[in-house]
Image (cartoon, rainbow, N blue to C red):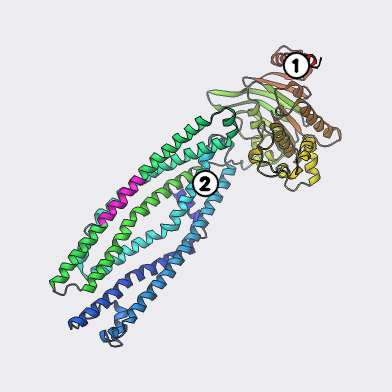
Amino acid sequence: MNLRRWKLIGAFMRGNSMRYLGAVCAVVLTVTIGFVTPRVLGGTVDAILDKVRGQDNPLTFFGVMNDFLYARGGRDYLLSRLWLPAIALIALNLFNGVCQYMRGRWTAEASESIAKNMRDRLYKHLQVLPYDYHVKAQTGDLIQRCTSDVETIRRFLASQVVEIFRAILMIIVALTIMLGIHVKMTLYSMMLVPPLFLFAMFFFKWVRKAFTLSDEAEGRMSAVLQENLTGVRVVRAFGRQKFEVDKFNEANDDLLKKSRKLCDLLAVYWSGSDLMSMTQTGITLVMGVFIVAAGHGELTVGEMTVFTSYISMLLWPIRQLGRILSDMGKALVSFNRIDEILAQKPEEDSPEAVCPPIDREIAFKNVHFAYEEANPVLRGVNFTVQPGQTVAILGATGSGKSTLMHLLQRLYDVQDGEITIGGVDIRKIQKNHLRSRVGLILQEPFLYSRTVKDNIAISATDAADEDIYAAARTACADGFIRDFENGYATMVGERGVTLSGGQKQRVAIARTLLRENDILIFDDSLSAVDTQTDKAIREALHQQKAEGKKGATTFIISHRLTTLSEADFIVVLDGGEIVQQGTHTELIHEEGLYRRIYQIQSALEEELGRDTEDEEA
């Protein structure tokens, strides 16, 4: 793991070091109590057996307790008060319970805090990633990384980080005490420990690879699910339910296959480690019985009881090492997937970026752009727009109309040539400043699952109600909104599904017009409204200019010539190049693409008019 990732972990854990320190202290106390308890039990057993045999062997408790008992009469004092060890065991276990509670609470608080830090960092970072990243990324996979992967890391931090320290501490303390009691018995008790440790290490390598495959499969399944739910109307419209079910089943079966392989590995490890642990316990018990039965005084019954208890304490952390390594492998995979997002370079402005006025002349100068080097989208685009003018852009699908507007907003940067506003190259303008002055209405607007009023007010949350209503009137939305039972308080379904396409479009237009814009872009956004509404919206915008209000420089992308005809001038794109530009009157008298489209649309309108007259007759 490189230095950058360690710094990232440190940033996530900031503010939680004291919680983990408290949890470590609680673990030290629980481990201490865990080792003291068998000594109390074993010492009591030896004292009783020595009394029965008439022997006067030394007490086998640990130092402090031995000193306490000898100061008050030794074995006779203990045997006359056997309730003392019982109370000691109860007190130790009660205190152990308190320590475990505090450890669990502190680790849970720390892990939840770290998970929150991770989610905050991820969400904030996603907001500043380039537009191109979001175009290429799968939404379902991003959601899975921000939820499931974060939760995997949280579980590891809550349950296993402190367990690593506890396991190491238990192994060291157990070996130290066991060697102090009986060296040969300790060696017998350690026979299968090295194989168990190696088994855990190999398991870590296997399970990490298996979890990576399982996590990626889950991400693909989440992406399929998200796409299906988002495009449910398209699925229903084309009757693609069976295809979508088959696609989901395929992704789900792949996840099942990889998850089952992961479960098989876990089953092999736990069953194998259980077998080795039980075998080692059996070896310890048998060898202990033989040594005690030999009667040479090497090992007492109480000490054998202590050994039997301690061997489980020794084997448990080594066996648990497999679970710790397994969860660590999962957490590392999840952390790497999260880091893949955080490693993406965010949008940045140059240090010399400026915030000039945006209501100035806009010039496209020999602009070239390509998403893929072999397929240029724009080639040598040149034209100039004066402040307040309305520019219409016409062209076939794929001719570069929307790309031109993306470049104007700096969603992408030009690869050759330049775009200037008031003589300033837009690559020298702060992106947030530029975009805050540009109003964009897309062909497919996105509405939130809120009220109509809230959706309009998103662009200006402090706007007065009258301003909201005025924007809705300009967008020809006020009428249908007031026809709703709850008016502006009507809830809009997710992505605006409760509204028609034209209604969504008009709400989106109102949302954009509510904010003061220096540049307005209608990216084929008037196509969803009828011709009459289209005309009404354009007339309302012209009326604002006629009343002396500041007019925005407006770009209209459309295939409807009645919409384009009233523009100050029109740009015709074909194959990424400007093939014509001029006013409507100029272009219909000029041989070219615009005139051909005009003739086709005029012929269709005439035919439609005749059909209507015939029906009326």
Kind of residue sitting beneath label 2? Cys
Q: Is residue 544 above or below residue 323?
A: above
Which amino acid, by three-letter code, is at mark 1? Leu
- Across and down, in percent, residue 526 comes to 72, 29
Mark earlier in primary sequence (2, 1)? 2
Visible in this render: residue 200? no
Q: Which residue is mark 1?
A: 608
232 lies left or right of 202: right
Q: Nearer the viewer, residue 203 or 604?
A: 604
Q: Nearer the viewer, residue 410 or 43?
A: 43
Query: Which is in the foreground here, disc 2 or disc 1?
Result: 1
Looking at this view, name the residue that lies furthest to the right: 547
Coordinates of residue 345 in the picture (x, y in percent): 54, 41
Mark 1 packing: few (<14 Cα in 10 Å), some, or many (20+)?
A: few
Q: Nearer the viewer, residue 196 or 134?
A: 196
Q: Can residue 194 be seen from the camera position used here?
A: yes
Locate the C terminus by quadrant: top right
Q: Which quadrant of the structure image shows residue 455?
A: top right
Residue neighbourhood size for the residue with mark 2, other residues' Cα within 10 Å, grouped as few (<14), some (14–19), many (≥20): many
What residue is shown at x 39% (from left), y 43% (from top)? 259
Q: Which residue is mark 2?
A: 146
- Residue at horizontal 42%, vertical 37%? 253
Q: Nearer the viewer, residue 70 or 404?
A: 70
Residue 348 place in picture, x, y as percent = 59, 41
Residue interval drawn in magenta: 263-276
The answer to whether 560 appears left or right of 74 in the picture is right
